[in-house]
Amino acid sequence: MASMIGRAPAASPPFLTALLSEIFASLRKLAVALKNRRQAAMLANMDERMLRDIGLTRSDLRDAYAEPLWRDPTDILAGRVQDRRRSRPAPDRKAFFASPPLVPHDGFTVPDTNRPSRHTV
């Protein structure tokens, strides 16, 4: 009778390991999609102005939630925001960072102050 001491445990077949890792990866992906769906549901409580501030519309939310349950709606929402940012014209950096001049320019006139005094001494 051979001794079992010092023997390594039998390795699981490679296809079983691959199958289990694929199942766990799919379950993890589903859990992340459901978590993101719950978090994205908070966007539905925002008003139009708040949605516009982050680059979304109410129809974007409807489109994202029209996807199947196992699809992550935040992928669609992030894609819409990126598309809008790319299609927006670039801001005029010179005008954005320009400050008003401190020295009056050539056409500057002093406002008229010849008003009657309210209080005379």
Image (cartoon, helix red, strand yellow):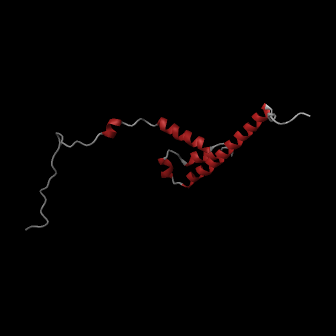
Q: Check the picture and name the quadrant holding the N terminus.
A: top right
The single residue placed furthest to the left in the displayed view is: 121
Kindly identify the residue that appears in the image at 35 percent across and 36 percent down.
93
Q: Position of residue 23 (x, y in %)?
A: 74, 39
Q: How many marks?
A: 0
Q: Residue at x 16, y 51 (%)?
A: 111
> Would you say 13 lies left or right of 92 here?
right
Side (left or right) of 121 relative to 88: left
Q: Is residue 68 visible?
A: no
Q: Of all residues shown, which one is farthest toward the right?
A: 1
Q: Nearer the viewer, residue 34 or 5?
A: 5
| Residue 18: percent from left, percent from top | 75, 34
**Residue 5 coordinates in the image, percent (x, y):** 82, 36
Taking depth in this image into account, of 99 and 111 the one nearest to the observer is: 99
68 w.r.t. 19: above or below: below
Query: Where's the C terminus, which quadrant?
Result: bottom left
Find residue 56 and report its horizontal and vertical position in percent.
52, 45
In the figure, residue 24 lies in which quadrant?
top right
Q: Along the horizontal axis of the image, is 42 left or right of 49?
A: right
Q: Nearer the viewer, residue 97 or 65?
A: 97
In the image, 114: left or right of 24? Answer: left
User: Which one is nearer the viewer's eye here, 9 or 71?
Assistant: 9
Q: Is residue 118 visible?
A: yes
Query: Is 12 above or below relative to 74?
Result: above
